Amino acid sequence: MNQRTLAALIAGPLVVVLGAVALAVPLPYASYSPGPTFDILGEDSDQAEIIQVEGHRSYYDDGQIRFTTVLSSARGRKLSLGEALARWANPDQAVIPYDVVHPPDQTAEQEKVEGEVQMTTSQDVAKAVALGELGQEVEPRLQVAHVDKEGPAHGELQVRDVFVKVDGKPVTSSDQVVEQVRSHDDGSPVTLQMRRDGKDTTVRIVPEVVDGTARIGVTLGVGYEFPFEIDLQVDPAVGGPSAGLMFSLAIYDTLTPGSLTGGRTIAGTGEISPDGKVGAIGGIAQKIAGAEDAGADLFFVPAGNCSDVTGLDPDLRLVKATTMHRARLSLETWVEDPDADLPTC
């Protein structure tokens, strides 16, 4: 056996081993893949309507309005080179910088709480936008968006409790509440006048002092006092703000006679702002893929995501959404004529 052959026999297995090691080395990337879609006009696991209305007539017709989700790889798990290459080759998956998917300045619990707060806010804003579309304006209020299970407010305050006064002083901003609570770092209780389900209630809470700052363990957010009750029975495991547009369309459909969808299945995504504008979101390609799997005929794409859908050719119609109002008009036009010209990217 000559030296060249011997070298090849030794080097070959080494190359294979090194290649395998390289493919297994974790990289600073995470992934997005299509998640489940949820029909907001449908029923939950207990056969109850997802949209429940009290104090106003509601209409439950045929058709589906689905919000879409994205599954991200788990926190703490970074893709290997082999996994990243496999996902790059799959058009329904995306490889994203790990720190974008899981910000380094957040713990897993903080990430979860943020998603819950965003979901609560998106639902309430969607209700306000839908009512505005019906000509019923509602005023924003400061409310509880999350209660820390380990904090002093647990058992005393609830999500969507509206702040009226703190220590007898009317409050309209989160800064006012935070400042007043922080003044109780001496162990004295803070007195909160809250409005819950249209009725005022007063609670006294002794803040806990963390790093020299008095806190009661709640996250504040924007809410509204609605003229009647609208509840969305959404799976609590689902978080984030991106279902806002679809929530508002589904609520509008439920509060008006007839089927907004013409009995067909539509899907979409987009964060909704109080003025009805639709904001861009992440994972648009994966959400479109999920909508295709659910049998959707039309998908609303936020205008800010138009550049992200260039080159996609899904088996459903993509319609650009700039505001809830224009999305509603596009949907009504499409129901009348599926071949009509609609806003596109």
Image (cartoon, rainbow, N blue to C red):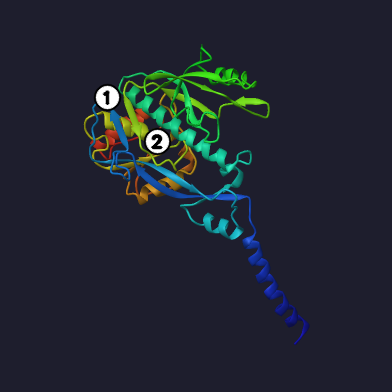
Residue 299 seen in this snapshot: no
Q: What residue is shown with label 1?
A: 55
Residue 228, horizontal then vertical, whole percent: 31, 23
> Regarding mark 2 in the picture, which secondary structure is present there?
strand
Tell me which amino acid carries mark 2.
Lys
Tell me the CA gap for discs 1 and 2: 34 Å
Viewer-nearest of discs 1 and 2: 1
Residue furthest out toward the right: 3
The answer to which of 234 and 336 lies nearer the viewer is 234
Residue 151 is tagged as none
181 over 155 or under it: above or below: above
Quarter in which the C terminus is drawn: top left
Quarter in which the N terminus is drawn: bottom right
Residue 56, horizontal then vertical, whole percent: 26, 25
Residue 61 horizontal side relative to residue 19, left or right: left
Residue 329, horizontal then vertical, whole percent: 31, 30
Residue 264 horizontal side relative to residue 183, left or right: left
Residue at image coords 31%, 19%: 135
- Asked whether the residues under the numbered discs 1 and 2 touch, taking CB atoms below 8 Å apart as contact, a structural biologist would say no
The answer to which of 28 and 234 lies nearer the viewer is 234
Give the class, few, some or many, for how many residues have Cα within 10 Å of label 1's Cα (few <14, many ≥20).
Answer: few
> Regarding mark 1 in the picture, which secondary structure is present there?
loop
First in sequence: mark 1 vs mark 2: 1
Q: What residue is shown with label 2?
A: 320
Residue 19 seen in this snapshot: yes
Residue 79 lies in what quarter of the image?
bottom right
